Each structure stands twice: as structure tokens, then as C-alpha cells.
Amino acid sequence: GNSVTQMEGPVTLSEEAFLTINCTYTATGYPSLFWYVQYPGEGLQLLLKATKADDKGSNKGFEATYRKETTSFHLEKGSVQVSDSAVYFCALRLRGGSEKLVFGKGTKLTVNP
Amino acid sequence: NAGVTQTPKFQVLKTGQSMTLQCAQDMNHEYMSWYRQDPGMGLRLIHYSVGAGITDQGEVPNGYNVSRSTTEDFPLRLLSAAPSQTSVYFCASSPTGSGAYTDTQYFGPGTRLTVL
């Protein structure tokens, strides 16, 4: 089946630290890949996406590269801020069928000043 | 644009009660969906619709009904609430078509439901 596995949290970092959240996927087809972010008490917002192999998505200093050979889409940021504290979800979407988003379980990030 | 709106934001029900969660979007998106979010489980698809008059089941449809009479609205009905339906519910929309799987789904702010 189709699934997304992301690193378990919670993750706690100091401001300006380097962030990596690992994400790997299993898919029967060729998916699009997404990172969504959920700030406390809010809905999910798209952070970045990539729709084909070797594409790099980027936004707000975050980056992730679609690696087909390792079926991965790891999220990175060079210097996190307190305002980055949130839950991050990796997700895939496949062509056809329900075209639903298949989500990982989420990784909670807390950044301390 | 308001984007995707959901009402109510919070709701408490007793077991056996019924209610409707409202969802509306003003982006003229054909695809709309309902997810539930439970701790440690990510989001799971309940029902989805690819256009007015067309609905289908997702992975956890039991206990829920949907209808899609207009492009804008996609209400979710709980027929007889159970404690297992305590969750946060999110509505989402996106364009549809041959390249839809590359498109972003836009989420509403969510409805936090507690069933006692």
C-alpha cells in the first residue's frame, strides 16, 4: 500500500540550530510529495512541495528534495526560529483513485530561545 | 478570498446525537474532502468529492454521510455520534483534473468535536 513514515518527535532545538526531519515513503505509483505545517490551534498549511524526482521544494528557509532512488523527502532548515515551532507533516498524493493525501503521523518541533 | 471555512470551531455532543459540520470554499475547486486528525495517527480521509453530485468513501467512512449539491459546500453529517468520533475534523479543497495529484490541497481551520 501507500504510506509515509516520518521521524518520531517531539524534536526540541535551540534557536539558530539546524533542523532535519526525515521522511520516507512507499507508493504504488509516482507520487507528488508535500510538507504541511500546523501551528498551534490552526489548520494545515502547505509549506513546500515537489512533483517529480530531483525537484527541490523551498519556502521560508525550509527545503526538501524529492529523492526517488531512496524514496525520501527530508525537510531541512539551516537556522530555526522560535516561530517555527509547530507540527510538520510529510504527505504524498497519487494520480487516480481518491487522489487523497496520505500523511505521516507528524513531527512536533519546539524551538527554544 | 476566504479560502476554506468551517463551522463550528468547537462542538460537544452526547452519544447518539446527530449533527452536521459545515465546510465551504470560494476558490471554485472541484475536489473537496474531509479528514479526521487523531493523536499519533496523522490525518485520515473520511469522504471526498470530485464535483457537485459526486461523492465517495475514503478510508474511515463509517458513521459519516456527505452530500455535494453545490461546488462550494461539502457538509459532513454524523448520524449517531459515538465517543470514537471525538477528533479534530478538517475540510480541504483543491483543483481537479489530469494533473490534480500535483496540486496543493487547501485546508480549513478545523472543527474540534468531543462526544461524551
Image (cartoon, helix red, strand yellow):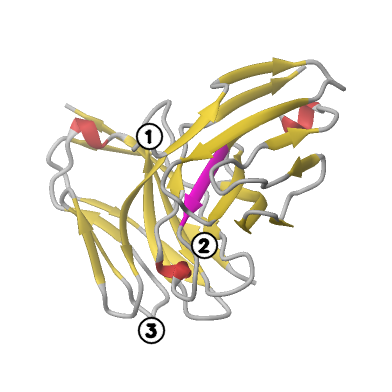
Count of labels in the image: 3
Reply above or below: A102 against A52.
above
Reply above or below: A74 against A47.
below
Local SS, label 2: strand
- Which residue corresponds to the image point at 76% horizontal and 48% vertical from the top-left? B61
Calculate the distance from the C-alpha at mark 1 to the C-alpha at mark 3: 40 Å
Q: What predominant SS class does the magenta segment belong to?
A: strand
Q: Which residue is mark 2?
A: A4
Q: Residues within 10 Å of mark 3 (few under 14, many from 20)?
A: few
Read off the chain for label 3.
A
**Type of residue at label 1?**
Ala
What is the span of residues highlighted in magenta in the rendered image? B90-94
Q: Which mark is residue A69?
A: 3
Q: Which residue is mark 1?
A: B2
Q: Nearer the viewer, mark 1 or mark 2?
A: 1
Q: Position of residue A14 (x, y in %)?
A: 19, 35
